[in-house]
Structure formats: structure tokens, C-alpha cells
Amino acid sequence: MAEFAWVPDVASGVLRNHALSEKIRGAAIAKTIILPYVPNEPGYGRRMGDTLTITRVRNMSEPTSALVGERERIPIDTYAQSSVSVTVSGYGRAVEYSHKSELLQHYDQESWMQKKLREQMRLVLDTLAATAMKTCKISYAPTSLSAGTFDTDGTPSTTALVNITVQHVKVLRDYAMDTIHVPGYGEDDRYILLLSTKGCRGIRNDSEFVAWHAPQGAQEHFVRGKIGAVENVDIIEVNHTNALANNKGTGGVLGEGLFFGDDAAFMATAEDPELRAAIPGNFGLDMAVAWFGIFGMGIVWDTANDGEARIIHVTSA
């Protein structure tokens, strides 16, 4: 009599795979760097309507002379204010699963769904933060290894011909400091330059960056993608291409970036994004978990004016 051949009659699944690893692997996501730079606006929340309006006080011009004679009246200057509004909307996604799959699956299916939904939520929020900041009026396109063109009407009209270099960072820094007087970010009063991986490669491959980086040595703290600093500009890598692209300009030569200082953007939150479990349907056999929130994002100053503009979009027509 021939020997028996023990062959399962199923093509795949737990009956086919007799040994399953106890460790479950999850696919990686891009880093979410941009969202922390878009803080929640205080004083707005539930039962306050669907639109948040921010009041902005404009600068008064510096007089040629503020000297007042003994019998002269003090000159009267004008005082102006303006506002910007953001309307909140609902955002969210969900995943469905069944009681049977939860009962028979060898790992905690709901926990992994929640983990992946949280990661998706972070990516969506990061992209929305970048999209809001890109509505700024000022853009910069590198056109040579040391120079570029600023557009100030909110629509990039210059084609980038090269990737960003240390010289461009200096140009951006001086424009922010001396031309539009952008206040520095945080207690250190520094500027932030968020760059896509390709943009960071343009900086890293620049021989001048090596000269800037060498003296910093061990004192430079590399946090969340920070690749270093040039003058008072912190350069931070963003590998989330839906937020900052790697293919701007002629032949996709430029890595997209956002240069900004203090009080650049804000988030109006009526309901914080959070995970939610659906009420089970079909007598508890159909289940789902979701993330959902009601919020909106915008920039504080939607102008290119001196003393008001806070963001420069490094991009191309």
C-alpha cells in the first residue's frame, strides 16, 4: 500500500499556514513634521459657529522725524486693522471589520486598525498643514546656484532651474530678516526651513554646508529630521511627499520647501481629531472604527507686505 500524502485542501489562510509568527509587522509611514508648526488657536471651540476670525493690527509707518516743537500739535498717524477667517470642516476615514474576523484572527485586529488609522490621520493633518502654509503670497524659485526669483502675488510664475543650495538659504534669510522683517520662531528667535528629502540633498551636497556644519559638531542636536543650521536657519527634512514634493522645477530638479518665522499659521478646532468606534450593526456582527475631527487651518497674514508676511514657499511655476 502506498504511503498517505497529507495535503491540506485549502489554498491559503490559517488552515494552510500551520505556524504563524507572534510578531505582526506594519508598513512604515512618512514622518509628520509640519503639523507641530500649526498650533491650535486659543479661544475657539464648540458652540462658536463654523468660522473663526482673527484680528490683525497693521504697522504704523516710521516718520522721517518725530520731533515736535514747543508750540506745535503732535502729528496724528493712522491706525489700521484687518482680519482673516478660517471655516472648519469635518475630516475622517473608517475601516470596517466583522465579528467573525475578530473572533478567528490570530492577532488583535482592532488594535492594529486603530494604529493604522492614527497614522493615516497624522499624514492627512500634516498634508493639510502644508497646504495651508502654501497659500502664502511669497514664493522663491532658485534660478542659479546662488540666486533666485521672488514672486509676491501668491502665484509662482518663475521656473526653478536648480536645486536649493546654502547660498539660497542665505538669500531667504536676508529677505526674511531685512526686506519683510519676519520675527524669529520660538525662544531662540530662529527661522525654520522645512525641505523635502531632495531639497535637503541639495543642501547636503553643497560643499559650503560642510563648512557650516563642521564647527557645530556634537553641539548640534539632530531632532526629528533636523540636518543642521545655516546662520540662524534650522533646516529640517520632510520625507512626506504629499506635503512637500521632490519634483519641482525643470526636470524635477528642485525639492519643495517652506521657510517661515513666528506666528505663521494656525488651526481652528471645533472638535479634536480622534478615534471612534461605530455602534455594531447586524446584531453585533458588523463593526467599524474611524477617525474624525472638525477643524480648519490657515495662515495668519495672507499678504506679502513688510512686517506682515511670515512664510516663503520654495517652489517653481
Image (cartoon, rainbow, N blue to C red):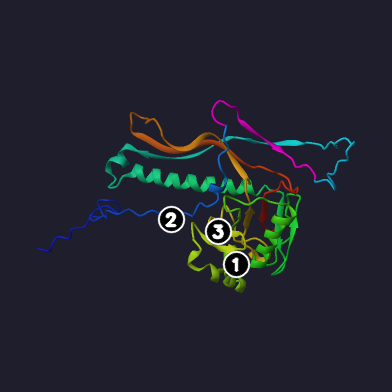
Residue 53 is a magenta residue: yes
Q: Amino acid at mark 1?
A: Ile
- Mark found first going from the N terminus, 3 or 1: 1
Q: Is residue 284 above or below residue 67?
A: above
Residue assigned mark 1: 203
**Is the stretch drawn in magenta largely helix, strand or loop?**
loop
SS for tag 3? strand
Q: Amino acid at mark 2?
A: Ala
Please give the name of the residue rendered at 56% of the width and 48% of the height, measured from the top-left corner: 37
SS for tag 2? loop
- Mark found first going from the N terminus, 2 or 3: 2
Which residue lies most toward the bottom here?
207
Q: Which residues are magenta?
A: 44-61
Q: Give coordinates of residue 241: x percent, y percent.
A: 56, 56
Please give the name of the residue rendered at 40% of the width and 46% of the height, measured from the top-left corner: 115
Which residue lies most toward the right here?
71
Res 162 quadrant in image:
bottom right
Q: Which mark is residue 28?
A: 2
Q: Give coordinates of residue 281: x percent, y percent.
A: 37, 30
Residue assigned mark 3: 236
